Image (cartoon, helix red, strand yellow):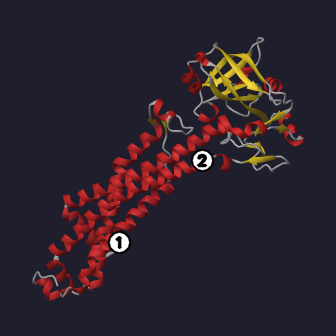
């Protein structure tokens, strides 16, 4: 306790030098917590949006279905098993039938995925109720990205061509019933949604589906013959991988910030030992052991980490609170090109574990860096120190 008090008095006595070092180190605290909080918040928002608009509690996939291989779509359909049908009839699941198709906006051809879904479903948070037929023409639901890239708006008519299960090409004119506002590219770009009953009739695939999406409470479902259940861990793996890669790249920046701060502390400790050699000799002559002198200088370095945490809390807390409550807004074009289901305004997520872990990490590194220069004291003779010499 006496050594800590002496170390504290020495730091306060150093005045501006101590506060400059604390201010530089506090910058590392704030940047690390803010950036990790931003990535964590981004993952949570992306996962929440995907669960709401695309995956719900999980999906049953036909065994041949591969979303990354469009060539599998011709064979990625099958009769829905009785167990899954019971879920559909109870309103706890909704079937989706997917086929390749083509549209002709502005006289040009574009490949799309034609997806059939039940207009009355309540599993996904997308406006499928707009697909209820109010006239003879086929209603079509698209996303804002799809509408923007093809210059489409609500009420426009569009020609759709597809090939049915027998290999026969057919075409129909559809009407844009609604343009949904979703942040999930997988259900927006290059996707047309129509009523599943019409889709099954058009493709000669009565009572068949490519996937069945279950509600959020029905997690952990078992595989069925010809159908594989994909849980949230599987369906959110891409987002997890992206966030992990971002955290790894961010760690490089953290390392540079910490390295710069540690170099400053290391150099300061060496200079302090050289400048205070007479003080060291006096302390040793008065009976303080070399170990206690080393502990004193190490404690001074560790206390810089504590002061840096206090300084960071003073100006970092309101900044982090403001970013967490107001969010960080980005241009819509930037978000759309990012390739993830994230909204235009990101809200960082800070946890006690994140803050505490950052503080412990930086303080541990600071203590180690403070100790390294003090090893020279173990070789110092009290008589030489009193004369102002360093061995």
Of 44 and 26, the residue lying toward us: 44
Q: Secondary structure at mark 1?
A: helix
Q: Which residue is depicted at the point 34% across and 66% down?
A: 366
Q: Secondary structure at mark 2?
A: helix
Relative to residue 342, is residue 292 drawn left or right?
left
Task: In the rendered view, tell whether residue 355 sits above or below residue 103.
Answer: below
Of 252 and 171, the residue lying toward us: 171
Disc 1 versus disc 2: distance between alpha carbons? 38 Å
User: Local crowd at mark 1 within 10 Å, few (<14), some, or many (≥20)?
Assistant: some
Q: Position of residue 143 (x, y in %)?
A: 61, 26
Residue 186 occupies quadrant: top right
Q: Position of residue 306 (x, y in %)?
A: 35, 62
Q: Which residue is depicted at the point 22% across and 67% down?
A: 268
Task: In the rendered view, tell whether residue 137 sits above or below residue 27.
Answer: above
Residue 359 occupies quadrant: bottom left
Give the quadrant of the N terminus.
bottom left
Relative to residue 182, is residue 71 drawn left or right?
right
Which residue is labeled 2 in the image? 238
Which residue is labeled 1 in the image? 368
Of 170 and 155, the residue lying toward us: 170
User: How many labels sit on residues?
Assistant: 2
Task: In the rendered view, tell whether residue 121 sits above or below residue 274.
Answer: above
Q: Is residue 3 visible?
A: no
Relative to residue 46, is residue 130 drawn left or right?
right
Q: Which residue is depicted at the point 83% across and 24% down?
A: 201
Q: Position of residue 33 (x, y in %)?
A: 43, 52
Residue 108 occupies quadrant: top right
Q: Position of residue 103 (x, y in %)?
A: 66, 22
């Amino acid at each position: 306790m006496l050594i800590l008090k002496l170390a504290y008095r020495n730091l306060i006595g150093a005045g501006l030098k101590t506060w400059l070092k604390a201010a530089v180190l506090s910058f590392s605290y704030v940047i690390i917590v803010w950036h990790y909080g931003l990535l964590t918040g981004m993952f949570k928002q992306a996962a929440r949006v995907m669960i709401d608009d695309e995956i719900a509690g999980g999906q049953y996939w036909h065994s041949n279905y591969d979303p990354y291989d469009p060539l599998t779509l011709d064979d990625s359909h099958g009769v829905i098993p009785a167990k899954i049908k019971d879920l559909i009839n109870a309103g706890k699941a909704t079937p989706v039938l997917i086929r390749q198709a083509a549209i002709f906006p502005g006289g040009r051809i574009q490949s799309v995925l034609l997806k059939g879904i039940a207009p009355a479903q309540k599993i996904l948070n997308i406006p499928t109720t707009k697909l209820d037929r109010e006239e003879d023409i086929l209603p079509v639901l698209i996303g804002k990205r799809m509408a923007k890239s093809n210059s489409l708006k609500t009420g426009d008519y569009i020609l759709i061509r597809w090939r049915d299960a027998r290999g026969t090409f057919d075409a129909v004119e559809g009407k844009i019933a609604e343009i949904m506002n979703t942040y999930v590219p997988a259900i927006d770009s290059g996707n047309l949604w129509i009523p599943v009953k019409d889709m099954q009739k058009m493709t000669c695939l009565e009572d068949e589906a490519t996937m069945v999406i279950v509600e959020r409470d029905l997690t952990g479902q078992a595989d069925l013959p010809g159908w594989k259940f994909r849980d949230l861990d599987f369906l959110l793996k891409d987002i997890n991988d992206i966030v992990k890669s971002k955290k790894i790249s961010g760690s490089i920046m953290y390392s540079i910030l910490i390295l710069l701060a540690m170099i400053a502390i290391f150099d300061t400790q060496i200079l302090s030992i050289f400048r205070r050699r007479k003080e060291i000799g006096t302390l040793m002559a008065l009976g303080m052991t070399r170990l206690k002198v080393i502990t004193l200088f190490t404690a001074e370095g560790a206390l810089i980490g504590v002061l840096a945490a206090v300084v960071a809390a003073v100006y970092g807390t309101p900044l982090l609170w403001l970013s967490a409550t107001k969010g960080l807004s980005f241009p819509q074009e930037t978000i759309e090109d990012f390739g993830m289901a994230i909204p235009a305004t990101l809200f960082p997520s800070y946890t006690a574990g994140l803050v505490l872990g950052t503080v412990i990490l930086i303080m541990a590194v600071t203590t180690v860096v403070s100790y390294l220069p003090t090893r020279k004291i173990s070789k110092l003779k009290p008589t030489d120190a009193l004369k102002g010499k360093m061995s």
